[in-house]
Amino acid sequence: MPEVTLVEAVNMALAKAMESDDTVMVMGEDVGINGGVFRATDGLLGRFGARRVRDTPLSEALIAGMSIGLAAQGMRPVAEIQFMGFIHPIIDQVVNHASRLRYRTRGRLTCPMVLRCPFGGGIHAPEHHSESTEAMFAHIPGLRVVIPSSPSRAYGLLLAAIADPDPVVFLEPKRIYRAKRELVEDDGKPIPLDCSFVLRRGEDLTLITWGAMVAETIEASEILAADGVTCDVIDVGILNPLGPNAILDSVSKTGRCVIVHEAPLTGGYGGEIAAQLAEHAMMSLLAPVIRVTGFDSVMPLPKLERHYMPTANRIVSAARKTLAYS
Amino acid sequence: MPEVTLVEAVNMALAKAMESDDTVMVMGEDVGINGGVFRATDGLLGRFGARRVRDTPLSEALIAGMSIGLAAQGMRPVAEIQFMGFIHPIIDQVVNHASRLRYRTRGRLTCPMVLRCPFGGGIHAPEHHSESTEAMFAHIPGLRVVIPSSPSRAYGLLLAAIADPDPVVFLEPKRIYRAKRELVEDDGKPIPLDCSFVLRRGEDLTLITWGAMVAETIEASEILAADGVTCDVIDVGILNPLGPNAILDSVSKTGRCVIVHEAPLTGGYGGEIAAQLAEHAMMSLLAPVIRVTGFDSVMPLPKLERHYMPTANRIVSAARKTLAYS
Amino acid sequence: MQVLDENGAVVKALPEFAKERTQIIELYRAMVLNRAFDAKAIALQRTGRLGTYASSLGQEAVAVGTAAAMAEDDVLLPSFRGHGSQLWRGVTMVELFQFWGGDERGNDFARPRQDFPVCIPVASHIPHAVGVALAMQMRGERRAAVCIFGDGATSKGDFYEALNIAGVWNLPVVFVINNNQWAISVPRSAQTAAETLAQKAIAAGLPGIQVDGNDVVAMRYSVEQALDRARADGGATLIEALTYRMGDHTTADDASRYRDDADVSHHWKLEPVARLRSYLQQAGLWTREDEESLLKECAKDVESAAQAYLDIPGRSPESIFDHLYYSLPAPLAAQRSAMLAEQIPDA
Amino acid sequence: MQVLDENGAVVKALPEFAKERTQIIELYRAMVLNRAFDAKAIALQRTGRLGTYASSLGQEAVAVGTAAAMAEDDVLLPSFRGHGSQLWRGVTMVELFQFWGGDERGNDFARPRQDFPVCIPVASHIPHAVGVALAMQMRGERRAAVCIFGDGATSKGDFYEALNIAGVWNLPVVFVINNNQWAISVPRSAQTAAETLAQKAIAAGLPGIQVDGNDVVAMRYSVEQALDRARADGGATLIEALTYRMGDHTTADDASRYRDDADVSHHWKLEPVARLRSYLQQAGLWTREDEESLLKECAKDVESAAQAYLDIPGRSPESIFDHLYYSLPAPLAAQRSAMLAEQIPDA
Ligand SMILES: Cc1ncc(C[n+]2csc(CCOP(=O)(O)OP(=O)(O)O)c2C)c(N)n1
Ligand SMILES: Cc1ncc(C[n+]2csc(CCOP(=O)(O)OP(=O)(O)O)c2C)c(N)n1
Ligand SMILES: [Mg+2]
Ligand SMILES: [Mg+2]
């Protein structure tokens, strides 16, 4: 069983999917000989050839639009968008076509495609290389939005995304691409796209997050544990459609919840989760639901980015506020 | 004082702004001789000439991008995007440039531009002509998102949007473009972009909405009034930045809240408002916060659209559920 | 490129298909039917029984000629003005009425199963066409994609991005511009400074040609040639079909606001149906009786399709949850139940 | 279009400016400084004192020649490889280091105040350029916008949409393609089937020309001519400058993964700095001492700029709320206070 990083797990899943299904193909900018700017597609060109591993011209909207045509024809394109700052030209194709091709043809044409994209800040990247606009995608009916936060989840969720009969936006937390190694069996087993992941179990507080922020959130839970406060830590994993059961179950138990994400507060996906709690767990809540997020400002250039992104300290201090209610 | 419809009020505000500020200009598809497909720019070409009233080629991304260049040069472009189904190609320019030109140049270059766009369903329009994706825009820091719901608010808010030194997405609820006439003085008075509008005052329940749904929401409040239930009805009006005071004040008073919008539930802007309540009004809440929204499905073609959009009945039944809690 | 001039006179050797009476009459019939369908659709719209509708009046030769050039297993990606192509390819009038009447089931046409539905967001289907063509190429099939769109569409980035990749990957696709001179109120001259739209192909290293879009023979012939080349691995072609939008943009539009009647009248002299009829009559292939019986037949077919359309039972509201995903996710199932619980009886 | 060939020999009449020693030497100096700046930036990056950096090695003539052709009150819209242009126009090395060091204040350069900052999302600044040009045209000014971008940018819709409107509205703008043959690992040949990038202008009805982008004299001359035409209401021009990316794409890239050393070595024979030096030497305008003193001077300037950059005090974290809006909206003020309250001391 290989011990791999998150980005290596992505690579492993891509290879596995291509190996077991001839219709799976990879495309995007620099995914061929260069193996992707983060090496997620490294080696695929050599293994599967230029017919199935394609460097596209520099046009994101085209990558998405072309994928739709391919998918409608029974191919399974897995396209890479290089950074989330450059993903926005594809929204038109995703909203108007990919997410509703099945719907508007009553199932006649379908759109099994995956758009992979590294997202988030914290790697001291240039301007426009650190965005987190997952909330925009999670508001699109007919689409799935999936975010892995560990090598094994990256492997299993990506396989599921590729096998899924509907379009998936698969966002990879690039800050933790190489943060940790994990033993991941290359067994081709998908992780179903209707669950969330309880990473820590506790009694006093529910911490909810996704993507790279899982690291800070777990760190916060450990700081709190030292004070005798135990937390459920939930990695949402699949933002849309959101199966909220694990979240509701946890909050009905703990009565307290802090939601963490890197994207700006206003209109962020944390709002959706807090709103579900305000509707469905209201009567269990013992304290206000606090969101610890990026500020409602532009992700700053590297010099200040660490002040923008939530830290374990900010999470702990929100948790303490929540815990102080009685 | 002219008695005008909402779309006429838009037209009146455009004319007033062009009259009083030479740098204001109008552009978009069919805004010239045709006066816009909804006639919002009717007569402007004749009055202000082809230099300031411009039919563009058919390219939405360009309309937004070009506006940024104009705005940086001190012009005040007011561009029309014909329908919200066609607005998505502009998101890239709005996220990456318009909303952050001031920020990334530390105030050296600025971007005072307005993108007007009719939105929402219910007019039996063709496919892709009935979308409501305001939540995507409300998640963009540095941008303002403004939605008028009456002729006088359309007039005052549009004047404020045009005068504002920062970019504004101005979404016009086309279903009520001609629903009602109102006396609106053509006095050039802007309505500040940091308020919301309390349309009805009551004690028992807070109903929150924006855009065309104001009509159904008021209707619901009237049905409830017949039962002796009185409501605050709040038209949010400015979604971003959201000044939540009126909302919080009202909910601290009533303890109960129903949020109404036409866009799909998941990731909709109602989530943001519910989340703010779950954080800041939690201790006043007497009942779960319910969202009455479009379903998490694609806006259907006209035959079924009325089943998709919230009705006064759905709002009333949510209200009754909320009121039943004690 | 022209075979029949304005008066229906032959100005270039007739291609083989045009020498066969049945074939040329089939083209004529399809254009007449297209026109009758448009007229009925407008009538239905005017009486509140159809949604906003985009007529293809005067542009029938582009739609029919293009479709006639295609093989059954090619894939068509039409814009919202492609009724004539869709009808030729086997979409039924009932299905078309159904779609334009505001019911998605009209897009689930019985054939051709792989064709795309009408595309409303201008130019956004052109990237799909290159995707379809790439799938065909990757599988080594001798098929091609055909994408039709308007002059206005040539201003959108999607158009150029798709053309560009069709060039660099040598994809089996034919792009047909239905240049009807208008994008709602914006004339072709305000859309671009390029002298022709065909020359935009040069930007992608593709061949681009202009065809008389009111000459159905020239249309079918040029698209056939482009398709032959595409299937023989010769790559993509851009065809600019020159025609004219004789009607309003849609039933929601009033073209008299922005264009001269004189301009419109002039174009009536060039329109494709009368032109082909002149040719057929001059060639002794068509009599007054033929014409009368064809008109009658088309009227009857259109009427009975309209009736069949009007007789289709409504869909249940909760069907808005069907076909969104392959299977209904749990949160949506909950919404569906809530809808059913709250459902108000049909007005 | 070429004035100086690979060996620095004059192959076409020298334009006036190139006959003046001070002017031609100014061009040379700017290219040498551009190169020294790039080298220092890479060194700073390698030692963790600058962020990811895109060097313009080998492409100095495009950057410098273009900027040298501009009037002060023209507006430049550069891509992320335009350091040479920015320096020529008055942005200081300190400001550039500051931006590339991850501090937005570097974009608030003291002059030229109307120039746009570096654009990172490829091609997205080309629409801004036509907006700037339109503002100039509407005010009846004799100014123009100049937009520089790479060969990869010519595949994006933004590029075509902007060119198209520049054509139809006859806007005073010059588009310069820094065709360095690569978009990260994707060679120019995989980007488009168009034989030249210049021919993409035909799609917009614009003139398009190819220029030897390693010949600073040709570069400056062609951009000057295009600017003269733009200012005289003659409309836009597309200039394809043929050059080569001698270095990695950025400091985050390793070009040896995807391209042959042989290809790179070949291009060292064509590069712009040595070429102009050859000319100057042959023309007796430049001595070994001149060269040495110039190199020393550039090194000194670059070093002191780097030091000044390193000495700039950090910004306070709460400044991320400044300049987001003209004035801080209430909800943001609350977030700002919260940030101040929670602020952890600098690590
Ligand atoms: C992207 C987009 N923008 C705007 C519209 C609204 N609209 C519908 S048709 C049309 C004009 C299209 O002109 P053209 O491409 O020439 O096609 P035609 O209608 O003439 O067939 C416009 C602006 C749209 N459908 N899609
Ligand atoms: C829209 C967009 N997509 C992807 C990227 C990532 N990226 C940065 S530079 C680059 C290649 C650009 O090539 P070219 O336009 O030729 O400019 P060059 O880097 O060669 O100067 C890519 C893909 C980006 N910055 N913007
Ligand atoms: Mg047209
Ligand atoms: Mg390049």
Image (spheres, coloured by chain):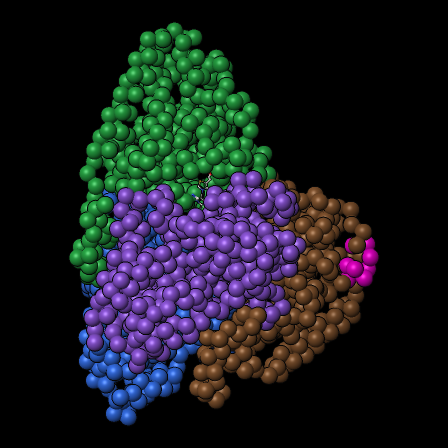
Chain colours: A blue, B purple, C green, D brown
State left or right for residue D292 relative to residue A174: right
Percent x, y of residue B269: 36, 64
Q: Give whichever of D323, C75 is nearer the camera.
A: D323
Judged by its main secondary structure, the magenta piece is helix
Q: Give whichever of D208, B1 is nearer the camera.
A: B1
Q: Can the viewer see residue B23 in this picture? A: no
Residue at 42%, 35% in the rendered image: C250
Quadrant for residue A286, please give it. bottom left
Q: Quadrant of the C terminus of chain B?
A: bottom left
Residue at 19%, 75% in the rendered image: A249
Percent x, y of residue A237: 28, 68
Residue C190, relative to residue A184: is it above or below?
above
Residue at 33%, 12% in the rendered image: C292
Does residue D72 belong to the magenta stretch?
A: no
Percent x, y of residue B164: 56, 64
Q: Give whichever of C91, D126 is nearer the camera.
A: C91
Percent x, y of residue D282: 78, 57
Query: Which residue is farthest bottom?
Result: A227
Number of numbered markers: 0
Residue at 59%, 46% in the rendered image: B44
Q: Give whichever of D192, B92 is nearer the camera.
A: B92
Q: Can the viewer see residue D29 in this picture? A: yes
Residue C305, relative to residue D149: is it above or below?
above
State left or right for residue A31 relative to residue C72: right
Does residue D22 belong to the magenta stretch?
A: yes
Residue B166, relative to residue D266: is it above or below?
below
Q: Residues in magenta?
A: D18-25
State left or right for residue B126 relative to residue A196: right
Residue C22, relative to residue B41: is it above or below?
above
State left or right for residue A257 relative to residue D129: left
